[in-house]
């Protein structure tokens, strides 16, 4: 039996694993994809304290799994399907195995939301993308559209503007949510054209996307683009615990200042928890807080 099982190996999960291992807990981290989390899809990180050179998310996260393993945590690649508690013992079922632990830290993060236009699902991999770092290069010297008005959309529009010939930034309102500095950079970029009060209605093209039908201030227009990148926010991945502990109206897990949920022995960190600021540094901090409190919790079980 493990002292703690951490579900998810993004910045929160890896930081929790590092702290738990270093404090002597028998620690297992289960990740369904590769370690690193959502941030590995970000093109540029310039706000992680102490990392003074601008890095890609992938570069930033590169050594985190090794550092975590150095302190004893084990990281495996399996998908967790079920989480339950029986006689005070946590049982974590994956598609391959069942593991047991004294405590669980949920670090499952969030996944990109769909914008909801016609053809969005059908054209994934054929012109619709949720990751500029992964797919941007395919659009070298082509015209693309970015949908959204938050930090992700504007940062990725900037990234794409260095690869694509032209970037149309499509936002449904006339005011951005992104930070003022990012908005300024976007406005200064010559090959980014901002389309305010605009939504994508449909995407078309055979076999690959070549047209977006847009609605600009009520007027329907055709936009010739080869790719549409969607950055319209995130859905939290809390389904594993929805019947176990309290969630808020957005499906985020309610936690206290120790990252403890409404159920003893269950902690939630990073983007899956309520009031998360969705920053790498904050998730890493959450991981440390949760792990140090799990150490106390496990010790109390023994005493
Ligand atoms: P976000 O801040 O929630 O922004 C989502 C954007 O998508 C909003 O502009 C929203 O429009 C628009 N939108 C939502 N649903 C839509 C739909 N169906 N069709 C068209 N547009 C739609 O999401 P985010 O940009 O992913 O950022 C999430 C969090 O991570 C934020 O707290 C952000 O600050 C943070 N973040 C930080 C950094 C950084 O610090 N470097 C980088 C990326 C993200 P409205 O504005 O009209 O609602």
Image (cartoon, helix red, strand yellow):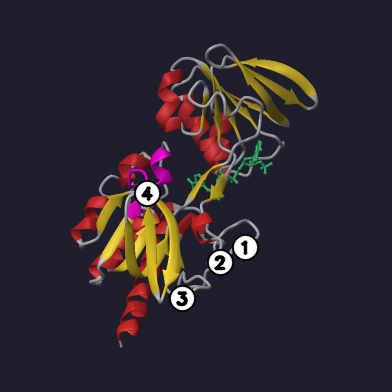
Question: What residue span does the magenta drawing correspond to?
Answer: 30-41
- Give the CA separation, mark 3 to mark 2: 13 Å
Image quadrant holding the C terminus, namely bottom left
Image vertical order of residue 228 relative to residue 244, above or below: above
The residue tagged 2 is 254
Q: Are marks 2 and 4 in contact (CB under 8 Å)?
A: no
> At x 49% / y 57%, what residue is drawn?
240
| Label 1, residues with CA under 10 Å away: few <14, some 14-19, many ≥20 | few
Which badge, 2 or 1, comes first in the chain's sequence? 1
| Label 3, residues with CA under 10 Å away: few <14, some 14-19, many ≥20 | few
- Give the CA separation, mark 1 to mark 4: 28 Å
Residue 143 is left or right of residue 38, and the answer is right
The residue tagged 4 is 95
Residue 4 is left or right of residue 179, and the answer is left
The one of 93 and 155 positioned closer to us in this rendering: 93
Which badge, 3 or 4, comes first in the chain's sequence? 4
Image vertical order of residue 185 relative to residue 180, above or below: above
Q: Are marks 3 and 4 in contact (CB under 8 Å)?
A: no
The one of 282 and 78 positioned closer to us in this rendering: 78
The residue tagged 1 is 248
Q: Are marks 2 and 1 in contact (CB under 8 Å)?
A: yes
> Would residue 1 be visible to someone looking at this image?
yes
> At x 48% / y 27%, what residue is drawn?
160
The residue tagged 3 is 264
Which badge, 3 or 1, comes first in the chain's sequence? 1
């Amino acid at each position: 039996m493990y002292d703690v099982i951490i579900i998810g190996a993004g910045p929160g999960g890896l930081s929790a694993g590092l702290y738990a291992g270093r404090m002597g807990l028998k620690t297992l981290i289960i990740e369904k994809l590769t370690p690193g989390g959502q941030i590995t899809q970000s093109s540029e990180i310039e706000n992680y304290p102490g990392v003074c050179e601008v890095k890609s998310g992938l570069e930033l996260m590169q050594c985190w799994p090794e550092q975590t393993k150095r302190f004893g945590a084990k990281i495996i690649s399996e998908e967790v399907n079920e989480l339950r508690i029986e006689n005070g013992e946590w049982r974590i079922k994956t598609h391959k195995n069942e593991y047991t632990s004294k405590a669980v830290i949920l670090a499952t993060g969030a996944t990109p939301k769909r914008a909801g236009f016609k053809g969005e699902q059908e054209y994934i991999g054929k012109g619709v993308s949720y990751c500029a770092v992964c797919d941007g290069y395919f659009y070298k010297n082509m015209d693309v559209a970015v949908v959204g008005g938050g930090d992700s959309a504007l940062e990725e529009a900037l990234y794409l503007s260095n690869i694509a010939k032209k970037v149309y930034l499509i936002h449904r309102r006339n005011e951005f949510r992104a930070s003022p500095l990012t908005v300024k950079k976007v406005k200064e970029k010559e090959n980014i054209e901002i389309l305010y009060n605009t939504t994508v209605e449909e995407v078309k093209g055979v076999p690959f996307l070549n047209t977006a039908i847009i609605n600009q201030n009520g007027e329907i227009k055709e936009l010739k683009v080869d790719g549409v990148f969607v950055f319209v926010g995130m859905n939290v991945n809390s389904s594993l615990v929805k019947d176990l502990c309290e969630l808020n109206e957005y499906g985020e897990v309610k936690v206290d200042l120790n990252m403890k949920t409404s159920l003893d022995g269950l902690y939630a960190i990073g983007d899956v928890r309520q009031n998360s600021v969705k920053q790498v540094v904050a998730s890493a901090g959450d991981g440390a807080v949760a792990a140090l409190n799990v150490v106390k919790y496990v010790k109390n079980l023994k005493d």
